[in-house]
Image (cartoon, grey):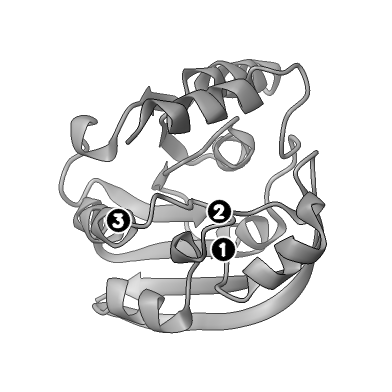
């Protein structure tokens, strides 16, 4: 992962305001509230809004990101909400999570570089126990057109970093699909997710 990629996110998260707000993602909130509380991992968790929400529900929360500034903000948010989270900084392969460690994994706008995104999904699968759940929301391939019309909605400008339903089926082939849809939604999350966008939403149970 290039230093410029890390610097970009450190710069975004170093500001006083929370880039994507402090409230949890709406889809994550809806789905997580229906699951039995256990241990959960948040990849690419940024400033911690979703991790802190899960901790407030009683989950044992782990998270990671490449941005130390994101972790700093997440710890601040956790302290303000009187919860604790385990938040690590670095590439996934260096973070030493364990096989079958988690009951759920929440991938919320976790747009990893195109050359590693499927590898990361397969690696994360190893950390989820049988019967565990993946909750996923991220921009679809079609979103590139929404971003071109309105940069305020956010999202990668590289189509290879965006997702398709077929990619999700391939990456999570050993899952019972509870929901897998592509749809247009209206985003209002902090400074960088505002406007209409196209997303993939997925909930799967590991078989």
Name the residue located 60 percent from the left edge and 30 percent from the top edge. 47
Closer to us: 30 or 139: 139
Secondary structure, mark 2, is loop
Q: Report x, y in % for residue 189.
A: 77, 47
Q: Is residue 61 above or below residue 67?
A: below
Please identify the quarter of the rendering in which residue 8 is found: top right
Residue 49 vs residue 157, the one in the foreground: 157
What is the number of callouts on the image?
3
| Residue at x 29% of width, y 34% of height | 91
Local crowd at mark 3 within 10 Å, few (<14), some, or many (≥20)?
few
Q: Which residue is mark 1?
A: 137
x 69%, y 46%: residue: 24
- Label 3 and label 1: CA atoms lie apart by 19 Å
Circle 1 crowding by C-alpha within 10 Å: few under 14, some 14–19, many from 20:
many
Q: Looking at this view, is 146 or 195 the one in front? A: 146
> Circle 3 — which element?
loop
**Residue 203, position in %: x, y?**
48, 72
Mark in the foreground, 3 or 1: 3
Disc marking residue 116: none
Q: Which residue is mark 2?
A: 109
**Residue 187 in sight in this render:** yes
Name the residue: 80% across, 39% down. Answer: 191
> Which residue is labeled 3 in the image?
115
**Can you say whether 203 is above or below 70 in the image?**
below
Q: Quadrant of the C terminus?
A: bottom left
Circles 2 and 1 in contact, beta carbons < 8 Å: yes
Query: Badge 2 local density, few (<14 within 10 Å), some, or many (20+)?
Result: many
Residue 23: image quadrant is top right
Answer with left or right where residue 162 lies relative to residue 89. Answer: right
Q: Earlier in the sequence, mark 3 or mark 1?
A: 3
The numbered mark, 3 or 2, whose residue comes first in the sequence reads: 2
């Amino acid at each position: 992962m290039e230093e410029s990629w890390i610097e970009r996110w450190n710069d975004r998260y170093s500001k006083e305001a929370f880039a994507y707000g402090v409230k949890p993602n709406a889809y994550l909130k809806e789905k997580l509230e229906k699951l039995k509380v256990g241990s959960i991992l948040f990849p690419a968790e940024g400033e911690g809004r979703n991790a802190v929400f899960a901790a407030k529900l009683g989950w044992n929360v782990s998270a990671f990101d490449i941005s130390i500034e994101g972790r700093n903000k997440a710890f601040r948010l956790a302290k303000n909400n009187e919860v604790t989270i385990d938040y690590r900084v670095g590439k996934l392969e260096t973070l030493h999570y364990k096989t079958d460690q988690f009951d759920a994994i929440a991938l919320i706008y976790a747009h990893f570089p195109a050359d590693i995104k499927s590898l990361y999904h397969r690696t994360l699968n190893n950390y989820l126990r049988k019967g565990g759940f993946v909750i996923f929301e991220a921009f679809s391939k079609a979103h590139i057109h929404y971003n071109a019309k309105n940069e305020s909605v956010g999202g990668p400008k590289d189509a290879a970093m965006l997702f398709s339903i077929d990619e999700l089926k391939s990456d999570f082939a050993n899952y019972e699909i509870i929901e897998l849809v592509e749809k247009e939604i209206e985003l209002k999350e902090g400074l960088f997710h505002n406007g209409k966008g196209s997303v993939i939403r997925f909930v799967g149970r590991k078989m």
